[in-house]
Image (cartoon, helix red, strand yellow):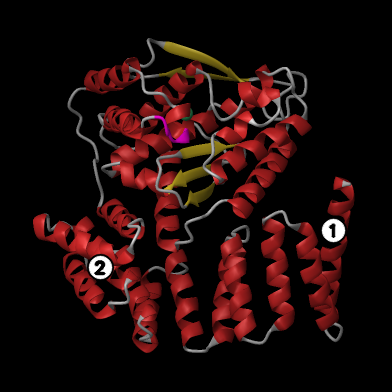
């Protein structure tokens, strides 16, 4: 099969001149690379492991921000399949990863440790480069043990290590895992730095951001002592790495570039408040922050800290002050709806969410807010409809199936409740539990021929899957 030959002309000192790289093509059996179907199986298994074991950030506002940024960055990357799945891991330590099949994982801690959007983007660009350069596939190519079963064990073990935030999970695995994992060789890391740098500059970010992020990581490494988080283990910061990044930026001269955005500051403030161990302390901490430095990140964090403590009126005062400055900002408007809904002012929330949806139809965080507001108003049928429509676009998000099942429970749609729970368990890879749920749903659907048929087909497909495993 034909190999892809990419010729790249890079601008910076990361590359001296022209670089020819031969990438393994997916489905190239001769060279032993893994096929597209196999990549799909690997990414499915990876997601199941992470979804069933990791604590995830279920927050449509942060999810939407991260997805939009990643898509924007990918436009100037070399990734050809831009069908990404973004997973947000609820962990305050710094980590990000890319796995086969366009999976990009971001720890909450990446937001905490990147000072601005350009630094945050530099890490995502690095991860996009691991994807575009097919480092995972190239690792499999190099290894002795090239069969699918080994690759499956490999991705599972990586997923478990990520989910449990325990790098030791690799070491307990089979011997070959110790050599190959998402820990890439230095050459691959350098390649990811180089391509990531080009990508971030091409998308308009400040070229100095990558070097600055490396400096942050080096400082963190000292801070952690022996208890080093995964990303810092797999991405050791050598002095060459830092100087290469700054040299590359210097070569470009003073070209400026984006450093931060209002939205990044808001998301960072939100997570800073969420990660305060005691919510009650968060109020005091943010009050101090606002008093010493009254910027949008601190005001938003203060508002979040107040709402987390049920002090909704005061929280709204802060959000309204920010809205005076940025009346059209979608994150601020969605947050206002969220606070109104949490304080049970459903009617007011509904008016605002409808207004915003007129401007941004089908916006993900707004639609989820609307479903929740309608649920509060006990308009559960309408809430169910909105979620079903959202699921047409995001049907592999387990948290949405879970929310739908809860709304169906309120709605006394018992057959629907069991079907949604089945979808949820399938995404977690818990097929036996999914089968149980479907059997409940089947019993309740005896009178509805169409639904009965749909459920029956699902049951048969699942049984087939389960038998294959045995
Ligand atoms: Zn890397």
Residue at 77% across, 70% down: 437
Name the secondary structure under disc 2: helix
Query: How far, Cα to Cα, is label 2 from label 1?
Result: 48 Å
Question: Would residue 227 be counted in the magenta stretch?
Answer: yes
Residue 25's disc is none
Question: Would residue 232 be counted in the magenta stretch?
Answer: no
Label 2 or label 1, whichever lies nearer to me, is 2
Q: Are marks 2 and 1 in contact (CB under 8 Å)?
A: no
Tell me where residue 87 appears, x and y as whole percent: 52, 50
Which is more toward the observer, 356 or 376?
A: 376
| Residue that numbered label 1 is attached to | 461
Does 27 appear above or below 276? above
Name the secondary structure under disc 1: helix
Q: Quadrant of residue 140?
A: top right
**Quadrant into which the N terminus falls:** top right
> How many residues crowd around disc 1 within 10 Å: few (fewer than 14), some, or many (20 or more)?
few
Q: Which residues are magenta?
A: 226-230
């Amino acid at each position: 099969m034909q190999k892809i030959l990419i010729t790249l002309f890079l601008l910076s000192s990361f590359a001296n001149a022209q670089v020819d790289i031969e990438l393994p093509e997916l489905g190239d059996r001769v060279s032993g690379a893994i096929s597209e179907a196999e990549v799909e199986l690997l990414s499915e298994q990876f997601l199941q492991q992470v979804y069933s074991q990791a604590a995830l950030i279920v927050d449509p506002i942060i999810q939407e921000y991260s997805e939009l940024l990643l898509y924007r960055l990918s436009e100037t990357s070399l990734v050809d399949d831009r069908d990404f799945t973004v997973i947000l891991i609820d962990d305050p330590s710094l980590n990000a990863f890319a796995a086969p099949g366009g999976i990009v994982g971001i720890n909450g801690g990446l937001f905490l440790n990147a000072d601005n959007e350009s630094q945050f983007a530099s890490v995502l660009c690095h991860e996009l480069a691991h994807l575009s350069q097919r480092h995972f596939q190239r690792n499999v190519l190099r290894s002795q043990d090239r069969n699918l079963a080994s690759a499956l064990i490999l991705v599972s073990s990586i997923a478990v290590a990520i989910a449990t935030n325990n790098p030791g999970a690799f070491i307990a695995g089979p011997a070959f895992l110790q050599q190959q994992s998402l820990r890439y060789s230095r050459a691959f890391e350098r390649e990811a730095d180089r391509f990531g740098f080009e990508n971030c500059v091409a998308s308009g970010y400040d070229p100095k951001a990558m070097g600055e992020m490396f400096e942050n990581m080096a400082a963190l490494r000292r801070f952690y002592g022996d208890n080093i988080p995964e990303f810092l283990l797999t991405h050791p910061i050598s002095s060459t790495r830092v100087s290469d990044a700054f040299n590359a930026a210097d070569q470009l001269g003073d070209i400026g570039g984006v450093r931060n955005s209002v939205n990044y500051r808001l998301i960072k403030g939100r997570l800073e408040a969420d990660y305060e161990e005691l919510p009650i302390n968060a109020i005091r901490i943010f009050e101090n922050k606002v008093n010493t430095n009254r910027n949008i990140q601190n005001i938003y964090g203060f508002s979040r800290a107040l709402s987390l403590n049920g002090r909704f009126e005061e929280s709204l005062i802060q959000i309204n002050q920010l809205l005076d400055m940025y009346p059209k900002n979608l994150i601020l408007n969605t947050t206002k709806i969220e606070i109104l809904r949490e304080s049970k002012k459903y009617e007011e929330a509904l008016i605002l969410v409808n207004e915003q949806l007129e401007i941004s139809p089908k916006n993900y965080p707004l639609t989820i807010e609307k479903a929740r507001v309608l649920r509060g108003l006990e308009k559960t049928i309408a809430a169910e409809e909105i979620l079903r429509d959202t699921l047409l676009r995001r049907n592999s998000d387990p948290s949405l199936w879970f929310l739908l099942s809860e709304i169906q429970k309120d709605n006394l749609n018992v057959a629907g409740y069991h079907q949604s729970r089945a979808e949820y368990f399938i995404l977690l890879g818990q097929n036996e539990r999914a089968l149980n749920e479907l059997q409940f749903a089947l019993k309740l659907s005896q009178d509805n021929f169409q639904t009965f048929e749909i459920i029956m087909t699902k049951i048969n497909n699942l049984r087939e899957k389960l038998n294959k495993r045995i």
